[in-house]
Image (cartoon, grey):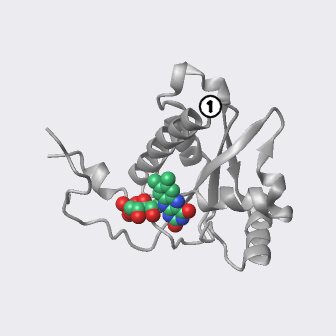
């Protein structure tokens, strides 16, 4: 039987306003840092935490510019910036980091969701452009939203989602 945590990890897009405790944030970040990274180039990655006032500004800007808060009003957003020149490898690194963080969040009793859509907006929208890059050439590749949820609706059978050849 597969580990329960894989079944319990689902996408949650509605959060309670309760803040995520600092200790839990650090555990989620640590889980991300333990992910496999191409050629072990961990220095290619920066995880940036958005919460409080800084997050509110991001969410207000999203609503103002697009009519929609793509972070689902979460109390915590973690953005993954990557400076690798090979975008294919960068995206694979980011996927591995994110999956670790989503699983850790769920293990800590938190809901979360993988959100790519914001990246595209930060490239095309003037007001959102400031989120696209950090000093040093680190480019936004994806974000996750995290927060407490009212209910976990994660009871499901492990259905066959992919084709498998063996
Ligand atoms: C690369 C990638 C990008 C995604 N981007 C978004 C997104 O922009 N917004 C969103 O609400 N969900 C996004 N998701 C979440 C998927 O829609 C979700 O994981 C999928 O439907 C399976 O559902 P589950 O997470 O509940 O198992 C993304 C997932 C992945 C892997």
Q: Quadrant of residue 58?
A: bottom right
Of 139 and 70, the residue lying toward us: 139
| Percent x, y of residue 55 | 74, 61
Q: Nearer the viewer, residue 110 or 129?
A: 129
- Quick one: which residue is furthest to the bottom in this view? 67
Q: Is residue 37 above or below residue 106?
A: above
Q: From the Cβ of disc 1, is ligand 1 less than 8 Å away?
A: no
Is residue 142 among the parts visible in the rendering?
A: yes
* Residue found 46% across the figure and 67% down from its top: 12
Vertical comparison of 145 with 81: above or below: below
Left or right: 14 in relation to 159 = right
Residue 53 position by quadrant = bottom right
Residue 59: x and y in percent read: 73, 68
Residue occupying image coordinates x 61% and y 37%: 87
Residue underneath mark 1:
86
Figure label count? 1
Rendered position, 18 above or below 35: below
Q: Is residue 112 visible?
A: no
Provide residue 147's location: percent of width, then percent of height: 54, 62
Q: Quadrant of the C terminus?
A: top left
| Residue drawn at (66%, 24%) of the image | 43
Label 1 crowding class (10 Å Cα cut-off): few <14, some 14-19, many 20+?
A: few
Q: Which is more toward the observer, 9 or 138? A: 138
Q: Residue at x 58, y 57 (%)?
A: 116
Left or right: where does residue 152 sit relative to residue 32?
Answer: left
Which residue, as the protein is rendered here, is positioned at the far top?
A: 39
For label 1, the SS is loop
Depicted 95 relative to depicted 67: above or below: above
């Amino acid at each position: 039987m597969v580990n329960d945590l894989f079944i319990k990890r689902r996408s949650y897009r509605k959060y309670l306003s309760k803040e995520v405790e600092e200790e839990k944030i650090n555990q989620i970040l640590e889980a991300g840092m333990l992910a496999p990274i191409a050629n072990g180039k961990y220095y290619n990655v920066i995880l940036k935490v958005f919460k409080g006032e800084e997050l509110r500004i991001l969410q207000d800007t999203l609503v103002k510019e697009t009519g929609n808060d793509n972070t689902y009003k979460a109390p915590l957003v973690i953005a993954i910036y990557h400076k690798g020149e090979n975008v294919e490898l960068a995206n694979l690194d980011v996927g591995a980091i994110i999956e670790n963080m989503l699983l850790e969040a769920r293990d800590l009793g938190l809901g979360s969701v993988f959100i790519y859509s914001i990246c595209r907006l930060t490239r095309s929208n003037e007001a959102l452009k400031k989120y696209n890059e950090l000093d040093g050439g680190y480019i936004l590749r994806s974000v996750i939203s995290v927060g407490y949820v009212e209910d976990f609706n994660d009871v499901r059978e492990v259905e066959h989602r992919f084709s498998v050849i063996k």
